[in-house]
């Protein structure tokens, strides 16, 4: 029997902060680039088409001595039963022995590592002077995208939020966003007062909902799309030179948030080429022949390691297609297991 | 957060008996046949070729309101570190909500459900009058194969055991087999005295190791192969008319235990056609064109439901190719979660 840890959502919220997750996700990307980590094929199943599905994303990080999986299910009817629609579970094992190490709730990890990905896209590809962030989508992922971007970019002065289905929703999002960001910053009030104060200043900016996505796009320095859209929301002709776009929402065949023609002249980076062309934002332009895999500059790990140039000029349009890879979850989960041991949180049992 | 159960190997050994597992595995097979259950694609990864690998087998049993996965890893060097080479973990979720229900150790479940499969093959395909069982392989799976077969067949008088690499090993296996079988029968001493007594009589037979697999095969009524072989051990010309063969060992590309030419005239049943032709005993004959998928009679669930004839005459050679499907593990695991609740065993926490 093996010692085995169980962490619930409460434990995880207590142990995880965005600055750390950004570091972990960057490390996951670079381990992949150094071939010390790899993804296994994704498993996807629809229980009821359009109403309930699940996927299993797995992989190994030999560079961190772990492997494992995240199983995420989506049951659209759950909220009517007072249950969350999206439920995730992460299982971590030791890649030297195959021994199971622990299991934990995957929802908060997913939000955090997905936010980190959007921020990392901006950090390595947006113009340093970027002042205006446009967030497309006002759902659960939004606050995590914003805080990760504000941590990564020094000069953001304005965030504009758009919801294609409901201006009201975007407006409500903007009204409550500062409280939510303060919540995400709370750990630093203990951990690092200087960073906390700095971040308090960074979030002290304007958050405005818009009904005019064309105008918002024309004025954006950075666009982050985090919606379940299946048709492009951002048109190519609206995007000004120099814009960076982090595409977060597309993680399944058929999902698309931005005009596929944007890929033709943009500098495109992805988290994983295989996933990007099959389930990511790159899927549609790839399948339409607008971009070949050799026109994808590189995976983002290569950019972080400085092996390839990101933005070459202030006029470049850059795209980061984040499909979400198991390595982000697994490295974060492993960090949580270590922290839980240190701080004596969670449950220790045997398996 | 969801209530979540953790069962370790000790809990599971206390809760599981072979007669129940045979019922559960039959139910898994028939749910699949009735399209109330299905397999998801298998994930396989080799960490070090020939030395360490893992697979993830997943699936859903909507008919039992569950889905989930079993992750099994094999690390050949583990025994030198005082760790088991094979480690398994089963995760069960609710197929109505996606909520995680529990996680448990997978080793004992795997042995039991694999034994059940071998026995079920004999139960539905061997001649009722079968007296002589030949077990090829004297490893950990052996006792489970024997007890399941003895539960399924009334007239077995002799078991012959062969190990291609070591007669000594087969001989030691035979010396200790009765103790091991008594251990597997122990639950019935409480549960069902009549069945216990009946089974005590059934195991009171001869167990003999052999060095002559040709002779053993020529005299066999039922052959069960449970080895990691990659070359056929049983030649076609040795197999007499009327023999049933349950092929258990092949669960990975390249594994093979019996002469592929046996498939040409045999009545062949499998647990899953997709797995059988890609990783099962059926792989080699299928790839060599000796058998087409339409020559596989049916999946075993169809036979259990009586939708198709199994053995048609006493002269038929019958084959059951058991590759091992996630549904066997998941239904067994779900039973264990229910039993654990009832008997207040295992650990209850939240995820």
Image (spheres, coloured by chain):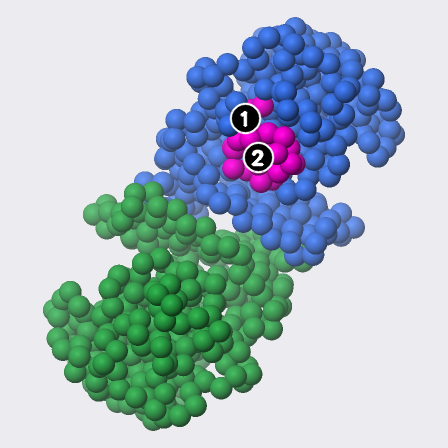
Chain colours: A blue, B green
**What secondary structure is marked by label 2?**
helix
Q: Position of residue A63 (x, y in %)?
A: 37, 31
Q: Nearer the viewer, residue B192 or A265?
A: A265
Residue A67 appears left or right of A217:
left
Residue B58 appears left or right of A230:
left
Whether residue A261 appears in magenta in the rendering, the answer is no
Q: Nearer the viewer, residue B260 or A124?
A: B260
Tag 2, which chain?
A
> Which residue is rendered at x = 74% and y = 18% of the image?
A239
Residue A175's place in the image compared with A91, above or below, is above
Residue B203 shows up from this direction: no
Identify residue for label 1. A296
**What secondary structure is marked by label 1?**
strand
Q: Which residues are magenta?
A: A268-293
Residue B260's place in the image compared with B130, above or below, is above
Q: Position of residue B324 (x, y in %)?
A: 42, 65
Q: Earlier in the sequence, mark 1 or mark 2?
A: 2
Identify residue for label 2. A276
Whether residue A276 appears in magenta in the rendering, the answer is yes
> Which residue is rendered at x = 86% and y = 28% of the image?
A167
Tags 1 and 2 in contact by the CB under 8 Å rule?
A: yes
Q: Nearer the viewer, residue A239 or B113?
A: A239
Q: Nearer the viewer, residue A103 or B66?
A: B66
Residue A46 shows up from this direction: yes
**Front position among marks 1 and 2:** 1
Residue B166's place in the image compared with B91, above or below, is below
User: Separation of disc 1 and disc 2 at Cα?
Assistant: 10 Å
């Amino acid at each position: 029997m093996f010692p085995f840890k169980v962490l619930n959502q409460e434990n995880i919220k207590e142990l995880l902060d965005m600055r750390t997750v950004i570091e972990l996700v960057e490390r996951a990307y670079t381990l992949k680039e150094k071939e010390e980590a790899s993804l296994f094929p994704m498993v996807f199943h629809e229980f009821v088409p359009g109403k309930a599905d699940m996927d299993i994303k797995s992989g190994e990080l030999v560079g961190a001595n772990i492997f494992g999986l995240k199983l995420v299910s989506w049951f659209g009817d759950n909220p009517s039963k007072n249950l969350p629609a999206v439920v995730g579970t992460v299982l971590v094992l030791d890649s030297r022995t195959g021994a199971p190490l622990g299991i934990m709730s995957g929802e908060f990890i997913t939000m955090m590592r997905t936010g980190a990905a959007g921020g990392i896209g901006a950090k390595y590809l947006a113009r340093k002077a970027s002042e205006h962030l446009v967030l497309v989508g006002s759902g659960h992922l939004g606050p995590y995208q914003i805080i990760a971007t504000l941590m990564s970019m020094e000069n953001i002065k304005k965030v504009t939020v758009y919801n294609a289905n409901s201006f009201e929703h975007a407006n409500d999002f903007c009204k409550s966003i500062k409280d939510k960001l303060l919540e995400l910053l709370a750990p630093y009030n203990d951990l690092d007062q200087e960073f906390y104060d700095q971040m308090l200043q960074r979030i002290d900016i304007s958050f405005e909902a818009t009904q005019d996505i064309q105008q918002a796009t024309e004025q954006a320095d950075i666009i982050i799309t985090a919606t379940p859209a299946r048709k492009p929301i951002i048109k190519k002709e609206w995007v000004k030179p120099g814009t960076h776009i982090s595409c977060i929402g597309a993680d399944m065949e058929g999902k698309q948030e931005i005009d596929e023609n944007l890929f033709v002249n943009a500098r495109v980076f992805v988290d994983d080429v295989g996933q990007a062309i099959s389930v990511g934002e790159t899927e549609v332009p790839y399948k339409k022949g607008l971009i070949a895999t050799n026109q994808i500059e590189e995976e983002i790990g290569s950019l972080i390691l400085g092996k390839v140039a990101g933005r070459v000029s202030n006029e470049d349009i850059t795209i980061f297609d984040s499909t979400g890879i198991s390595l982000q979850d697994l490295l974060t989960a492993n960090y949580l297991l270590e922290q839980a041991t240190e701080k004596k949180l969670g449950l220790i049992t045997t398996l």
